[in-house]
Image (spheres, rainbow, N blue to C red):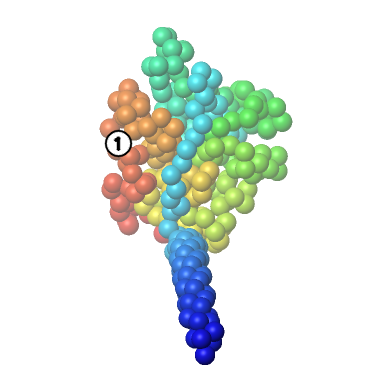
Amino acid sequence: MGPGNAASPRVLAGTGLLSIKVEGNNARTMNAYRRISLLFILITSLFASRAHAQQTGAPFSQATQYRIPAKEKIPVAFVITDNAVTIDFAGPWEVFKDVFVKDRGKTMAEQAAFRLYTVSDSRDPVTTSGGMRIIPDYTFDDAPAPAIVVVPAQRGRSPKMLAWIRKMTTQSEVVMSVCTGASVLGDAGVLNHKPATTHHLYYDEFQAAFPDVLLQKNKRFVQSSPVIFTAGGLSSGIDLALHVVQLYFGAPQAEETAHLLEYEGTDWKGDGAAGGLVPESAKRE
């Protein structure tokens, strides 16, 4: 009886330790399970919200970080072919030209943040809207790699041009269209299943030509992806260019640029929503 009685407490004590260990392991397993479940729910919600945004045409929204070289200028390529609408490229050109960052140097030439150039199928003169003639700086074969690409409304749709634009959407930081330049991006096939906007007179035409693009109406500009932006008609390109300046250098620098331009529009500060809607009577039937 004595040895048996002595052994019982040890067995009971051992059983108690085993129980504590099992319960501890179960608790850790349940905690890990809860963390995994929570992570799964968060990931599922993220994908669901992204899918909903695509289905409803909600503009892409993402904090964007761009590399700002210490001294080198940020290269901006303007795609120019016949019938390019002058304000579509001249507006953004003037915005980027007038960005002067004071801590980059003493002279305005040193402070200029962007380097601008034109690109086309060849170096033959291009006749833009209103008869302006431009000799392109580069061709699609030899253009320097741009950080930003501006695509205005224009006639050109050469296979080389569309292939170059497709390539730039994978290599550049920003590819932005202005006005019906969105149709150029559409023809390049880079807007499928993405939100985009264009000139209000061409909403119906754009929607018919690109049914897989999620048309956004009454927008000054739309961010279609981390790289691609589309602006509405004409002066909307100025707002989008100022918005891009803000993404690179912050709102104070963009404000300073707008002040230098004596540009009083403020739609560049937001998400592209137009300050004034276009009357229905002004839209093409």
Q: Relative to 81, does residue 257 appear above or below in the rendering?
A: above
What amino acid is found at the position of numbered circle 1 in the picture? Gly
Using the rendered image of the protein, determine whether residue 101 is visible from the camera's viewpoint. yes
Q: Position of residue 207 (x, y in %)?
A: 50, 59
Q: Is 115 placed left or right of 159 in the picture?
A: left
Q: Relative to 14, does residue 237 appear above or below in the rendering?
A: above
Residue that sits furthest to the front in the current view: 2
Q: Position of residue 110 (x, y in %)?
A: 46, 13
Q: Label 1 belongs to which residue?
A: 265
Residue that sits furthest to the top in the current view: 106
Residue at image position (70%, 39%) is: 160
Q: Relative to 220, does residue 9 appear above or below in the rendering?
A: below
Residue at image position (46%, 57%) is: 215
Q: Relative to 34, does residue 16 appear above or below in the rendering?
A: below
Disc 1 element? loop
Residue at image position (49%, 73%) is: 17
Q: Where is residue 285 in the image (x, y as percent from the top left)?
A: 41, 59
Front residue of 257 and 128? 257
Q: Where is residue 169 in the image (x, y as percent from the top left)?
A: 60, 43
Front residue of 168 and 215? 168
Front residue of 18 and 268? 18
Residue at image position (44%, 32%) is: 248
